Image: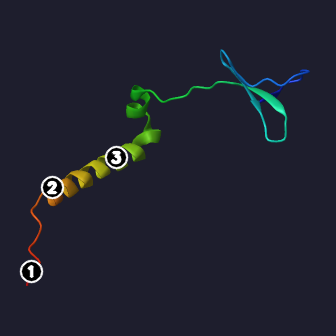
Amino acid sequence: MSKVIAPFLIKGTIEDANFVITADGENYARRRGRTRVTVEEFKNNPVFDRIRNQGQEFALHSSTLKRTTECPPLNTDH
């Protein structure tokens, strides 16, 4: 981040520049970065392999849970 030297404080966004005021009153500017991962990058980048595998496992277990909750409740009267 770059420190802003001006007689006034700037806060907000102008095109790709974000102006922030820190807790100690300093004024900084930073460029807006890339905000998301594309679908193609998520599918093809090996960095996301573990996340994709965990998502598949979660889907498997949630569908199993859905099937077991659709069963009628057991009669607990003795």
Q: Quadrant of the C terminus?
A: bottom left
Amino acid at circle 3: Gly
Q: Earlier in the sequence, mark 1 or mark 3?
A: 3
Q: CA distance from mark 3 to mark 2?
A: 18 Å
Q: Nearer the viewer, mark 3 or mark 2?
A: 2
Amino acid at circle 1: Asp
Name the residue: 91% across, 21% down.
7
Q: Earlier in the sequence, mark 1 or mark 2?
A: 2
Name the residue: 79% across, 23% down.
10
Residue to which mark 2 is pinned: 67
Q: Nearer the viewer, mark 1 or mark 3?
A: 1
Measured as percent of width and height from the top left, residue 2 is found at 80, 27
Residue 65: quadrant of the picture = bottom left
> In the rendered view, does 44 fall on the left or right side of 29?
left
Mark 2 Cα-neighbour bin, 10 Å: few <14, some 14–19, many ≥20: few
39 versus 64 height, above or below: above
Q: Nearer the viewer, mark 1 or mark 2?
A: 1
> In the rendered view, does 68 fall on the left or right side of 20?
left
Residue to which mark 1 is pinned: 77
Residue 48: quadrant of the picture = top left
- Which label is found at residue 55? 3
- Which label is found at residue 52? none
Name the residue: 44% across, 29% down.
41
Mark 3 Cα-neighbour bin, 10 Å: few <14, some 14–19, many ≥20: few
Residue sitting farthest toward the front: 77
